[in-house]
Amino acid sequence: MAKQIIHTDAAPAAVGPYSQAVVAGQGKTVYLSGQIGLEPETGELVSENFEGQVRQSFANMQAVIKAAGGTLQSIVKLTLFLTDLSKFASANAIMADVIPQPYPARSTIGVANLPKGAQFEVEAVIVVQ
């Protein structure tokens, strides 16, 4: 899938592993539901550890993307939900490790609670051919 990355110096530069905007090539748009750090086999959180939950959330998202016929390169937009925004840098570092460049567009939102007591959730929009 061809993605065109939009960047302008007339707006602030990205402060993490994301692009200001992404234009997706022709294809099928797929809206993924949010994924938290649940182990698929048990339906329980992988751990109480924030980083472990973030990595499991991205792994779960990747499994759904694969089932939809895409890859991590298919992501055009991510939304991250954190119950503790002081862990933003940690989530950024893990995202930069997991998601290939050029990075998709992204929003990050601080929330009071997530299902099952999770500390992190990720949702995505992908475009597949």
Image (tube, rainbow, N blue to C red):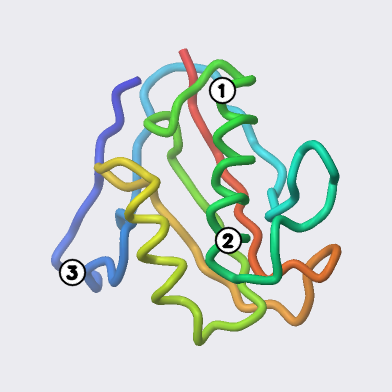
Q: Is residue 54 left or right of residue 96?
A: right
Residue neighbourhood size for the residue with mark 2, other residues' Cα within 10 Å, grouped as few (<14), some (14–19), many (≥20): some
Residue where numbered disc 2 is placed: 52
Using the numbered discs, state the Cα–Cα distance from disc 2 to disc 3 in whole angstroms: 37 Å
Closer-to-camera residue (113/108): 113
Closer-to-camera residue (86/29): 86
- Residue drawn at point x = 31 percent, y = 41 percent: 100
Residue neighbourhood size for the residue with mark 3, other residues' Cα within 10 Å, grouped as few (<14), some (14–19), many (≥20): few
Vertical comparison of 128 with 31: above or below: above
The amino acid pointed to by label 2 is Gly
Residue where numbered disc 3 is placed: 10
Residue where numbered disc 1 is placed: 66
Number of dots carrying numbers: 3
Q: Is residue 40 left or right of residue 97?
A: right
Element assignment for label 2: helix
Query: Which numbered circle lies on residue 11?
Result: none
Vertical comparison of 34 with 54: above or below: above
Closer-to-camera residue (64/127): 64
Element assignment for label 3: loop
Label located before the other in sequence (2 or 3): 3
Element assignment for label 1: helix
Residue 45: x and y in percent read: 76, 58
Label located before the other in sequence (1 or 3): 3
In front: label 2 or label 1: 2
The amino acid pointed to by label 1 is Lys
Q: Is residue 45 left or right of residue 105?
A: right
Using the numbered discs, state the Cα–Cα distance from disc 1 to disc 3 in whole angstroms: 36 Å
Mark 2 touches mark 3? (CB < 8 Å): no
The amino acid pointed to by label 3 is Ala
Residue 37: x and y in percent read: 68, 54
Label located before the other in sequence (2 or 1): 2
Q: Residue furthest left?
A: 9
